[in-house]
Image: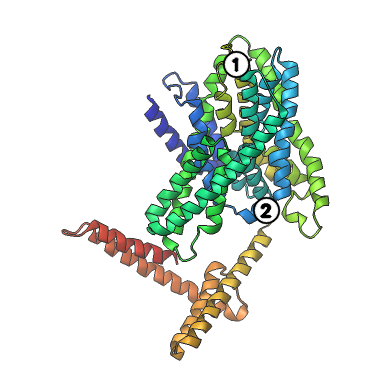
Amino acid sequence: MDQLALLFVLLLGALISVPVGDRFGLPAPVLMTLLGIVLAVLDFVPNVDIPPDLILPILLPPLLYAAVRRTSWRQFAANKRPIFLLAVALVFVTTLCVAAVAHTIVPGLPIAAAVALGALVAPPDPVAATAVAGQLGLPRRLVSILEGEGLFNDVTAIVLYHVAVAAAVSGSFTPGEAALELVLSAVVAVAVGLVLGWGANKLMDLLGDATLQIGLTVLVPYASYVLAEELHGSGVLAVLTTALFLAEYGSDADDVMTRLAGHTFWDIVDTLVTGVAFGLIGLELHNAIRTASGRWGEMLGWAGVIVAVVVFVRLAWLLPATALTKRMHAKRDYEEEIPVGWRETVIMWWSGMRGVASVALALAIPLETESGAGFPDRDEIIFIAFGVIMATLVLQGLTLPWLVKRLGVTADSEREKEFEKSLAVRAAKAAKQRLKEIESAEELPEELSEQMQRRAFEIGVRIYPEMGDEERREARRRLKRMRRIQGEMLSAARHEVLAARSEPGADPEVVDRVLRHLDVRSLR
């Protein structure tokens, strides 16, 4: 098997793991990691030949962009306190605790190298957290906080990692310079993200075509990441800023085709890239195994201690952080922004899985220092890092569904239904208001006006079928019957148009264009 065949196996596994995970109640990223582990121990499977410094630039931009599309800046703003406590403060605390323990138990491990280890195992993986949490039907407030933590903690951890590695390589460290680098990195990243987001938004208006606009959304995250890194900023924060800007200002309510096609496209990208990323985590296990030859007992002991530190620190931090956040909010709104009760706090704790970023940072540790000596305890750091990744991702990922079910933590479906109903009512009212404006400007026949009134009501019913009172149940039944008949009519039309594609002299592009119009009409 060569590298290309291995890539196809991972892509196929990414697709198959989704229905298999749904069937057995297991997270697809964890299944892909297990697949990678199985492939890593097979003799005919080649070692992954990807330069470590390319793993983050290749995988993170599309994954971050896909994740941000599911949220909004206002959601982050509403959750700013818990996200800050988890994504910034907890990363610092975990880094320091891991560094202190590692420096104590690993003989000869310098402080700078220990901080590098702490930084690379500190951030829970944004892809793992959102993929796993989103599958389990957790309350939306928990998913929002996990998404925010996962998206922003890499920014803090990667900057800390670069500072620690630079100190280990050069042999010098200045706290003031490190703090200044952290601030400048964030400022540069936000500036790059905003500029590229604004430019991409303007360019989308110029392109017009849905295919070209979606193609631009593929390029923009990479451009944002690379440009920020070139200017010594945080590539991760730049991608987040660009994606949030486009999510806020780059959406045209009437651009139906781009929205439908873009949603489908990015769902596919998210599934495939996530699968490959977690498959690579399992495949890279051979690097850790190779470093432990002859020292299994000692190195497994170190890894076990660091795993315990990482897991315990998260719990020890979450308990007071949740209590603090409650005091900082008025009683009427804090329930939307923090875990409610000890059960949800436990789920937040057990959702702290490490993944892609930790693997990439571990493998990217330099081989040598400026003096030409080997990077201090590089093999030990890599082995411990993989121990943390495997223990948190596989153990916690496999047991999280059981824990969620055991504790009975589920989404507030009634609240979601009420919000959906309110949106349906607002949509129907907006349609009726626009109809009144048209009637005041144009002379509409009474029959047409009544028909349009029914259509305005139908807009809300299509969104929320239970909307309306008892008197309108018959109208809903008629609408349901009409939609069924209309669906069958459109199906017949699609079959007829598709059959024309095989007729002599038929232009496939014209057929596909007509078919696309019918497809969009079928979704309305």
Q: Residue at 60% x, 47% y: name it.
A: 134
Report the number of discs.
2
Where residue 427 sits, quadrant-wise, is bottom right
Instruction: Please tell me whether residue 473 is drawn above or below residue 521 in the rendered image.
Output: below
Amino acid carrying mark 2 in the image: Ala
> Which quarter of the figure is the C terminus placed in?
bottom left
Q: Residue at x 66, y 58 (%)?
A: 413
Q: Nearer the viewer, residue 134 or 124?
A: 124
Residue that badge 1 annotates: 375
Above or below, 103 relative to 132: above
Compute the Cα span from label 2 to label 1.
Answer: 41 Å
Q: Is residue 218 left or right of residue 86?
A: left
Per the image, the residue denoted by label 2 is 77
User: Helix, strand or loop at disc 2?
Assistant: helix
Q: Is residue 418 left or right of residue 484?
A: right
Indicate the position of residue 19 as horizontal and vertical percent values: 50, 44
Between discs 2 and 1, the one toward the N terminus: 2
Is 470 situated above or below 39? Answer: below
